[in-house]
Image (spheres, rainbow, N blue to C red):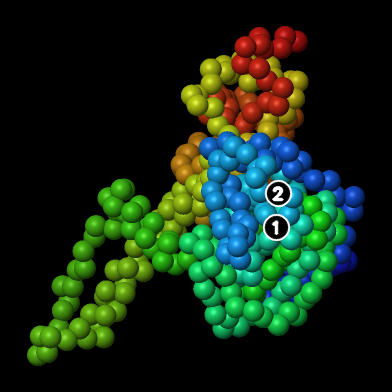
Amino acid sequence: MQLDINGLTPAQFLAEYWQKKPLVIRQGFSHFQDLVSPEALAGLAMDELVESRRVYQQEGQWQAEFGPFESYDHLGEKDWTLIVQALNNWIPDAEALIQCFDFIPRWRLDDVMVSFATPGGGVGPHIDLYDVFICQGSGRRRWRVGNIGPHKQFVAHPALLHTESFEPIIDTELLPGDILYLPPGFPHEGITLEQSLSFSVGYRTASAKEMVGALADHLSEQDLGVQQISDPDRALSNRSGCVDNTDLARLRSQLTNMLSDELVSEFTGRYLTQSKCALDLPDEPLDITQTEVLAWLDEQPLIRLGGLRCLYFDVNVAEGAVYINGDKYQLAVELAAVIPLLCNVNQLDKMALAPWLTSPAFLIQLTEWVNLGYWYFDDFDADDEAPID
């Protein structure tokens, strides 16, 4: 799958459009194929582990329902939408779509959302707080986009925050393969003209409020940040009720000095690799041996689980630190060079891993990840014997 951003390089797109203004990308994907069929999508939305919702209007009022769903027959043939979050957690083909946008680092990735809509279907005019590439699959959808500004928002339904009517700066139809890029804050509305599918690759960050709250929990759980202010050089004060500028600087330093690169990478590494949606993991760890891992690597590559978040930091990767699915793994320093490979490459074959497969420590760790379901062999059957050379 190849991405063409109207002839722009990724660097030009980032400089001119990213978080600045919307862009209609005509035929960003040539011969785009749907990642999932409507029938398969409906089946996914029947699974309680999959986050899904339906949006429609009933007697002029907006309605939203959350899955899992057992039937769709009563909804009719128009004016409703089915949305499934984190398609990349369940459909391996979604990885190829994400890779097209890997000029944006994965820590910014939210998920791939898919929307199936019947004619007239939509979710109403609204404003998102994240960047999104809306990739049109089969069918056609009309999009209206307004300019950023102080738009009044209101609750159309407890699960739907809508915005007041707006004057469009973009009013266009998306055809299969077209893409609409939207930065945060621009009001928009999509209305389906014929039965259609669209695939949205979203990028977001947490607010400072969310991060500070999660950091406080991390400090408490790890018993960090317990140092108190020390002031042996305190000057005489004749204003007992005043926090003077020197003391304010001490208080600020107490907070800022705590936020070392070590603490920030430790906390954010765990925080950013937590998946907001369920992953397609085994109920219990598998029972695959190191011998089987090596034997299967002779036959096929290891594939990283869709939706699995794994990251590293320039500040401590040389020390062997890698963060996967909310946990920190500390590898030996001599294994540090494998970490970028694990985090940057979706499929790992034996040739790529060869420099580290002679390390017992790495093979133990890799086997643990395979048994957790973080990496898997596409054709592996736990009941089969390992292939024999």
Residue 190: image quadrant is bottom right
Task: Judge by depth and name the residue closer to the eye, 255 or 234.
Answer: 255
Q: Residue 321 at what x, y percent from top left? A: 50, 44
Tell which residue pokes out farthest to the front in this image: 59
Question: How many callouts does the rendering have?
Answer: 2
- Left or right: residue 9 versus residue 235 is right
The residue shown at (33%, 58%) is 216
Q: Residue 144 at what x, y percent from top left? A: 74, 72
Task: Judge by depth and name the residue closer to the eye, 7 or 68.
Answer: 68
The amino acid at mark 1 is Asp
The answer to whether the residues at label 1 and label 2 have Cβ atoms under 8 Å apart is: yes
Numbered disc 2: secondary structure: loop
Q: Residue 90 at what x, y percent from top left? A: 64, 38
Residue 79: give its label: 1
Residue 34: image quadrant is top right
What crowding class fits label 2: few (fewer than 14 Cα within 10 Å), some (14-19), or many (20 or more)? Answer: few
> Is residue 127 depicted above or below 246 in this figure?
above
Task: Judge by depth and name the residue closer to the eye, 348 or 138.
Answer: 138
Residue 354: give its label: none
Residue underneath mark 2: 76
What crowding class fits label 1: few (fewer than 14 Cα within 10 Å), some (14-19), or many (20 or more)? Answer: some
Numbered disc 1: secondary structure: loop
- Left or right: residue 387 versus residue 177 is left
The residue shown at (29%, 79%) is 249
The amino acid at mark 2 is Gly
